[in-house]
Image: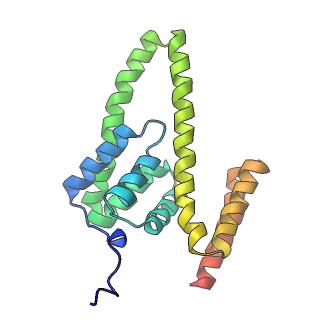
């Protein structure tokens, strides 16, 4: 393969070992205050290059379609992609183990000290930071979709946003209408 036809280094996907999967999802889980998705995307796409931005979006879209918490579903989908059932198990354990321990300890502390006024202000600040992280990851996930092409995909994303955020229609209704439309558009164009 000549140098001109070789893929650029940024698109090279690296296959992680099981121990790397576990360690990475532990880091994601303890970094993910307010939501682990921004940290998972940063680690998987930008730092480790285990997936491209488009592959991440596709895996995450599948995770949203499945019942249960999106990032938990994503850890299982991602882990199984690179390590089968053992990969899914270690990614899931890495994602869920540390928060379970931390939340249990915090629940005991909150039960004892939850009525302190300063704690309410701290939690309000954390909420604002978590919202900012969520907005940032949505913008990063949308960038390849809008940059790659202007066909049906960005229009579906805009329609979903308008339906849920502006029109305030119920999310299940928007999903039931737009999911088949999106699948049909993908089927026709591929």
Can you give x and y, in whole percent of width and height, for residue 118 in the image? 52, 12
| Above/below status of 184 relative to 109 | below
Q: Is residue 126 left or right of residue 158?
A: left
Q: Quadrant of residue 100?
A: top left
Give the residue furthest to the front. Answer: 4
Identify the image quadrant of the C terminus: bottom right
Which quadrant would residue 50 be assigned to in this image?
Answer: bottom left
Against 173, residue 36 (above or below) is above
Total numbered labels: 0
Task: Residue 47: give x, y in percent of width and height.
Answer: 33, 56
| Residue shown at the point (67%, 74%) measured from the top left | 152
Indicate the position of residue 115 as horizontal and vertical percent values.
Answer: 52, 10
Q: Nearer the viewer, residue 88 or 118?
A: 118
Residue 169 in view: no
| Figure coloring | rainbow
Image position of 31 with respect to 184: above or below? above
Compare residues 20 and 43 and report the one nearer the observer.
43
Residue occupying image coordinates x 48% and y 37%: 34
* Quarter of the rendering occupied by the N terminus: bottom left
Viewer-side residue, 94 vs 3: 3
Horizontal side of residue 68 vs 166, given as left or right: left
Q: Is residue 119 above or below residue 28?
A: above
User: Residue 185 at x, y = what percent?
Assistant: 65, 78
Answer with the quarter of the image where residue 84 lies.
bottom left
Residue 122 can be seen in this image: yes
Which residue occupies 68% across, 54% down? 172
Residue ranking furthest to the right: 167
Q: Residue at x 57, y 55 (%)?
A: 139
């Amino acid at each position: 393969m000549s140098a001109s036809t070789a893929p650029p280094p940024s698109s090279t996907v690296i296959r992680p070992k099981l121990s790397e999967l576990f360690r990475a999802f532990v880091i994601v889980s303890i970094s993910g205050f307010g939501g682990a998705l921004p940290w998972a995307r940063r680690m998987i796409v930008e730092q480790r290059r285990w997936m491209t931005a488009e592959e991440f979006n596709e895996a995450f879209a599948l995770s949203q379609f499945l019942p249960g918490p999106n990032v938990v579903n994503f850890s299982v989908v991602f882990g199984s992609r690179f390590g089968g059932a053992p990969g899914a198990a270690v990614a899931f354990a890495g994602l869920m183990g540390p928060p379970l321990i931390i939340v249990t300890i915090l629940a005991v502390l909150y039960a004892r000290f939850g009525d302190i006024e300063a704690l309410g202000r701290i939690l309000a600040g954390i909420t604002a930071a978590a919202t900012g992280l969520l907005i940032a990851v949505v913008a990063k996930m949308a960038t390849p979709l809008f940059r790659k092409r202007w066909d049906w995909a960005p229009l579906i994303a805009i329609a979903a946003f308008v339906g849920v955020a502006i029109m305030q229609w119920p999310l299940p209704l928007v999903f039931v209408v737009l999911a088949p439309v999106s699948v049909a558009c993908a089927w026709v164009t591929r």
